[in-house]
């Protein structure tokens, strides 16, 4: 298959791109910045929030072939708290999705969209259902951008026959997420702090979230790619997560266990715009995609900690760099 991934320099895009290549597929990346992790993914440098561009030319001057089988649209400003501070980025997310949908419409290409559990709002329920998303509980500009992206996709399916899968991800962690210069994510941040015997702050003692190891996420998306391109399924919205809840405190304890370090933890209230309780019902993913997540939080944290420490050993400038604020 020929697969175009937007946001191919990001965490999930890099993991998916390399996975697809290992399976023998051809991957074409588009991102506003080069890939910091690998040179294997050909990347067209383009700002997707600018007026519609055909993915020809661009800053990288890479010409992409006309025979793309599928677009996986990952590009976004993906930080909830950052978008509370800079809501104009939420609008850019919507524009990016519009541009990608125009490309798909004009070239009759199916699309996979990376939505988020954020569309459910802060529902304080243990189980969620795909059919339920109450916009009255939109928690943040980031949530609004994902709800808008989904709505645009559904409208393109109605009006132009677009074939799609929407995946609602939840706290994906693992390889290629510890570029702390670019974006401070809570798990790599805690790994670094705890490994350096530094204190950590947990925002929300009561927060229970569904953490997804990146290999499970990629396996689910890959099953979706095969079935969407193969014509087996289309036009579904699917939760993709591990399907169990864990507190941030538990997650931090697993990190301290993995590193053999003591935990120096301060707990503060959750911040504005944050979802504080989410556990995905992954029954639809299981039924449609035969999705069976494999990696528990404890096992995943041990893998993530080992990978991060190895990576930082090769990039000590990142390990010892300063940072401004935890934007998770
Ligand atoms: N990682 C998670 O836990 C999670 C959870 C729910 C949803 N998602 C969604 O999944 C997708 C992938 O997430 P990720 O963790 O890999 O995020 P990421 O931030 O690592 O990757 C997103 C990529 O989009 C690129 N991008 C941003 N603005 C762009 C622009 N104007 N033009 C072109 N490229 C641009 C960034 O440079 C980045 O490489 C995102 O849409 C995110 O909102 C992620």
Image (tube, grey):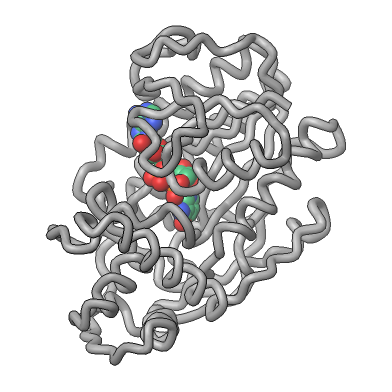
Residue lying at 48% horizontally and 29% vertically, measured from the top left: 97
Hey, which quadrant is residue 200 in on the image? bottom left
Q: In this view, does 117 lie above or below 110?
A: below
- Residue nearer the viewer, 175 or 7: 175
Quarter of the image for the N terminus: give it: top right
Q: Can residue 76 be seen in this view?
A: no
Residue lying at 52% horizontally and 23% vertically, measured from the top left: 100
Among all residues in the image, which is located at the extreme right? 232
Q: Is residue 288 left or right of residue 293?
A: right
Q: Is residue 148 above or below residue 108?
A: below
Q: Is residue 316 above or below residue 76?
A: below
Q: Where is residue 192 in the image (x, y as percent from the top left)?
A: 28, 70
Q: In this view, does 240 lie to the left or right of 182?
A: right
The image quadrant where one finds ligand 1 is: top left
Q: Can residue 257 be seen in this view?
A: yes
Q: Position of residue 250 (x, y in %)?
A: 43, 85
């Amino acid at each position: 298959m020929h697969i175009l991934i937007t946001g191919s320099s990001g965490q999930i895009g890099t993991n998916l791109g390399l996975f697809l290549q290992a399976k023998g597929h051809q991957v074409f990346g588009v991102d506003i910045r080069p890939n910091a992790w690998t040179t294997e993914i050909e990347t067209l440098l383009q700002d997707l929030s600018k007026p519609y561009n055909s993915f020809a030319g661009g800053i990288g001057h890479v010409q992409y072939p006309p025979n793309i089988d599928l677009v996986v649209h990952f590009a976004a400003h993906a930080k909830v708290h950052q978008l509370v501070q800079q809501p104009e980025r939420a609008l850019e997310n919507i524009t990016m999705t519009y541009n990608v949908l125009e490309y798909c419409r004009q070239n009759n290409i199916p699309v996979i969209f990376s939505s988020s559990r954020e569309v459910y709002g802060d529902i304080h329920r243990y189980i969620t259902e795909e059919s339920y998303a109450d916009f009255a509980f939109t928690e943040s500009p980031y949530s609004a951008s994902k709800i808008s992206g989904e709505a645009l996709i559904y409208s393109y399916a109605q009006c132009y026959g677009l074939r799609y899968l929407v995946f609602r991800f939840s706290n994906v962690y693992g390889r290629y997420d510890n570029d702390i210069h670019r974006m401070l994510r809570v798990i790599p941040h805690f790994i670094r702090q705890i490994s350096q015997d530094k204190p950590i702050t947990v925002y929300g003692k009561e927060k229970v979230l569904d953490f997804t190891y990146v290999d499970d996420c990629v396996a689910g998306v890959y099953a979706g790619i095969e079935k969407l391109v193969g014509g087996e399924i289309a036009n579904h919205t699917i939760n993709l997560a591990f399907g169990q809840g864990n507190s941030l405190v538990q997650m931090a304890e697993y990190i301290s266990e993995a590193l053999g370090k003591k935990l120096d933890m301060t707990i503060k209230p959750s911040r504005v715009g944050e979802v504080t309780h989410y556990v995905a019902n992954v029954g639809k993913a299981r039924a449609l995609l035969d999705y069976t997540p494999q990696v528990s939080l404890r096992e995943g944290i041990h893998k993530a900690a080992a990978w991060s420490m190895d990576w930082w050993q090769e990039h000590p400038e990142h390990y010892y760099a300063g940072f401004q604020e935890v934007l998770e």
